[in-house]
Image (spheres, grey):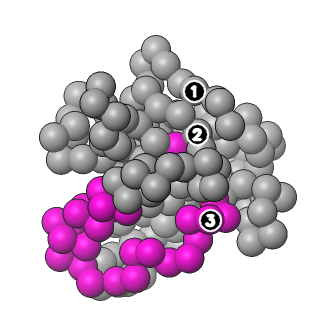
Amino acid sequence: MGMTSKDDRFDGRWWRFDELTGRQVHDLLKLRQDIFVVEQNCAFPEIDGQDPVTLHYLVEDAAGRIVGALRAFVPGERESASEARIGRVVIDAGHRGGGNGRKLMRSGIEGLRHLAPGHPIQLSAQAHLESFYASLGFERCSEDYLEDGIPHLDMVLAG
C-alpha cells in the first residue's frame, strides 16, 4: 500500500496480506505465536483465517525482522469488514518499553483514521491493558469476558 509512518511512531508500513512475502508471513505468524501462545501460555487458534482479509501494519528492525505488528479491519475494504477494528497488537519482548506500544497504536489509529474516516475504531483488549488503551482515547463498551481463558473487554474510540 505504500503508507508509512515515521517521526514519533514505531516506524512501520501498511501491507495487504497478498503483498507480504513468504518470509514476512512466516515472521509475523511466528512473532504472534511466540507472544500470544507461548509467552502468554494460551493454546488457541492464533491463525484464525482473518489475516487475508485485513491490513497489516508491520514494524521491522534494521535487519528486516518483524518486531511489532497489528492488523486492521477496514469497513468496505473486504467483504468481512463491517467496522474499523484493530487487533493482534504485538511487540517483540526485546522492543517493549520506551513507549513503543503507544507508538504502534498511534500508527494504527492514524492509519485507520485515513483508511476509514469518521468510523469509530473498536478493539478487544486484554483487561489488564484497559488503562493503556483508555490513555489513547478508547472507552470501555462491554463487561469483562473470557476469551481463550484471558479476561478481555471491548473498547471503542469515537470516530
Nearest to the eye among marks 3 and 1: give it: 3
Q: Quadrant of the C terminus?
A: top right
Q: The residue under label 1 is which amino acid type? A: Thr
**Badge 3 vs badge 1, beta-carbon distance below 8 Å:** no
Up-down: is 27 above or below 79? above
Task: Measure the alpha-carbon separation of dots 3 and 1.
Answer: 20 Å
> What is the x, y in percent for residue 117?
79, 40
* 103 with respect to 35 (left or right): right
Q: Residues within 10 Å of mark 1 (few under 14, many from 20)?
A: some
* 17 with respect to 31 (left or right): right
Which residue shows up at 78% across the image and 63% down it?
78
Residue 155 visible here: no
Which residue shows up at 22% across the image and 40% down it?
96
Q: Quadrant of the N terminus?
A: top right
Q: Which mark is residue 4?
A: 1
**Badge 3 vs badge 2, beta-carbon distance below 8 Å:** no
Which residue shows up at 58% across the image and 39% down it?
14
Q: Which mark is residue 14?
A: 2
> What is the x, y in percent for residue 11?
43, 26
Pointer 3 residue: 52
* 41 with respect to 109 (left or right): left
Could you say which quadrant of the image residue 28 lies in? bottom left
Could you say which quadrant of the image residue 39 lies in? bottom left
Up-down: is 72 above or below 4? below
**Secondary structure found at label 3:** helix
Which portion, as a residue range, is magenta?
Answer: 29-57
How many tags in the picture?
A: 3
Q: The residue under label 3 is which amino acid type? A: Pro
**Badge 2 vs badge 1, beta-carbon distance below 8 Å:** yes
